[in-house]
Amino acid sequence: MRWCATLVGTAERPAVTDKRTTLEDMVTELRSGMTIGIGGWGSRRKPMAVVRAICRSDLTDLTVVSYGGPDVGLLCATGKVRRVVCGFVTLDSIVLDPHWRAARQGGTVSLTELDEGMFYAGLQAAAWRVPFLPTRAGLGSDVLVVNPDLRTVRSPYLDGPFADPEDADVELVAAPALRLDAAIVHANRADVAGNAQFLGPDPFFDELFLGAARLRMVTTERVVENGSLGEEGPLAGVKVHRLLTDAVAETPGGAHFTACPPDYGRDEAFQKEYATSASDPDAWSAFRSRYLDLDEDGYQAAVRAAGDRR
Amino acid sequence: MSADPVGITRAEVCVAACAEAWRDAGEVMVSPFGTVPAVAARLAKLTFSPDIALTDGDAALMVGAPPLGTASGELVLEAAMPYRTVFDVVWSGRRHVMMMASQVDRTGNQNLSAIGDWSRPTVQLVGVRGAPGNSVNHPTSYWIPAHSTRTFVEQVDVVCGVGYRRAAAAGPGATRYHDVRLVVSNLGVFDFETPDRMMRVRSLHPGVSPAEVQDATGFDLAIPADPPTTRLPTPEELQLMREVIDPRGQREREVTG
């Protein structure tokens, strides 16, 4: 990666590659037409700073792979998306994202709709470099009808020591590997070397998104020195080790307005404003100029100002 | 709405009916969607199904059955249950989910993805979510608070949760653990315990006639000659619902008619 520099080492702390970069440089690495995985779940710990940076870029024609939340709605509303791969799109406290509804009902984006567990199996398959993983999830449902490219697979264990007589010859869904050109996740903490830590209750599938991707990018509330994450919280929360990352950017408030516990909860008032902005073109254009036609610092200032007004 | 002379509401009848879904469930994770099922799961845990495991709605299993709306800081937690682990539980079969449905049909298919043509829906809903996987891996029931010809349809627009006919067509991989157990609505309790696995009335809530439920249903229901009446909540269950689990009466806001 061109942004990588090598830190000067000492006897106590040998040199590691410094993966720090900026938000804008991260987005520069993306290309129109790419398949991009976005971590988090629903309206929870989404890498929204990168999503916003994509919104104001000239990227287009993206395939977005996501446990969908406002990342999907925003990218669709700003015309960045050709296809979405997901099992749902929700804002959690607001069940349906009106921007996503508008995109679907207007026919402006294509959809690969997968069972959310099949989606997990697909990320895992990509991270393990196998073409598919078998699962029952999807059998009998319209997931196999609306995605005619999905295939099933039969168990090869018809007899012998590994055969389960009740599942002999069983036909299962071959959940396809969801290989990503790029993945973006947002962590509570990360270090300069690209280890990343989750301090909230659910790490979601973020390390699998990174494992499934060629270009792997982490944003975080705060970057610390290599070797210091243990002081921030349990090492068991460092689900992302540096073998999974290419770049790290510090973006305080980078998951706003989605929830990023324990650093901050969901900004429900702002989320409502986001949802309401889908109601008519004027409202959307006002939202866009107030919050999206700005760099990240400008966005964070506008959010603070909006909070003060409320 | 009063269902009987002692002031038991329809919502309270629905809570007890949903709780029955988990009677004798043993040690399984119970995942209720909607307010009435959330009250019902707690009720089941506090009475006849103490071993069921309930999540805090986030990423942990909680001890006991605290009241609806208990602040997360006040919950006592017993184990982590992040989404990745939820799928382990789903695929192990140790779960009984009660999902909601925008549509359900006579063979037990459920839809929460889209209304109209999937390729360009009239109404985009939340998505298939985990319904396909749930329905072929562990017991799955549905809660539909507003029983009507719009929700009980001949054929759902998008098959998310898999019904009996679809599962059979998909083969043993789908049928081995398939178990669409109950559909509970504001009018009655329904199951698929017929020779052809078509939806039948298991019981009608007090005050609901066979004609009323058939009129509100978009297909021919199997209705026994003398359909049973859904049992009333016991005094102990009413006390738990009203004073312990849901003192603010949120259950009443979910049930119409």
Image: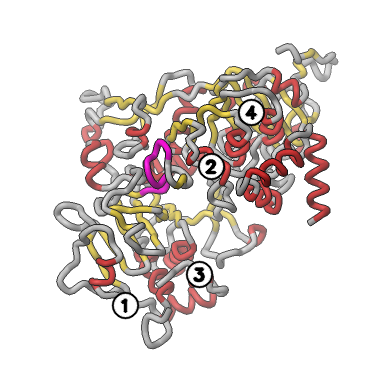
Of the residues shown, which amino acid type is indicated by label 2? Ala
Q: Is residue A118 left or right of residue B70?
A: left
Q: Nearer the viewer, residue A255 or A233?
A: A255
Of the residues shown, which amino acid type is indicated by label 3? Arg
* Residue B206 disc label: 1
Of the residues shown, which amino acid type is indicated by label 4? Ile
Q: Residues within 10 Å of mark 1 (few under 14, many from 20)?
A: some
The dominant secondary structure in magenta is loop
Alpha carbon distance from label 1 to label 3: 19 Å
Residue B112 highlighted magenta (yes or no) = yes
Q: Residues within 10 Å of mark 4 (few under 14, many from 20)?
A: many
Q: Is residue A128 left or right of residue A183?
A: left
Mark 4, secondary structure of its residue: strand
Q: Which residue is mark 4?
A: A184
Q: Nearer the viewer, residue B226 or A70?
A: A70
Picture residue at 83% right of the left edge, 53% below the top: A308
Figure quadrant of the N terminus of chain A: top right
Q: Which residue is mark 2?
A: A102
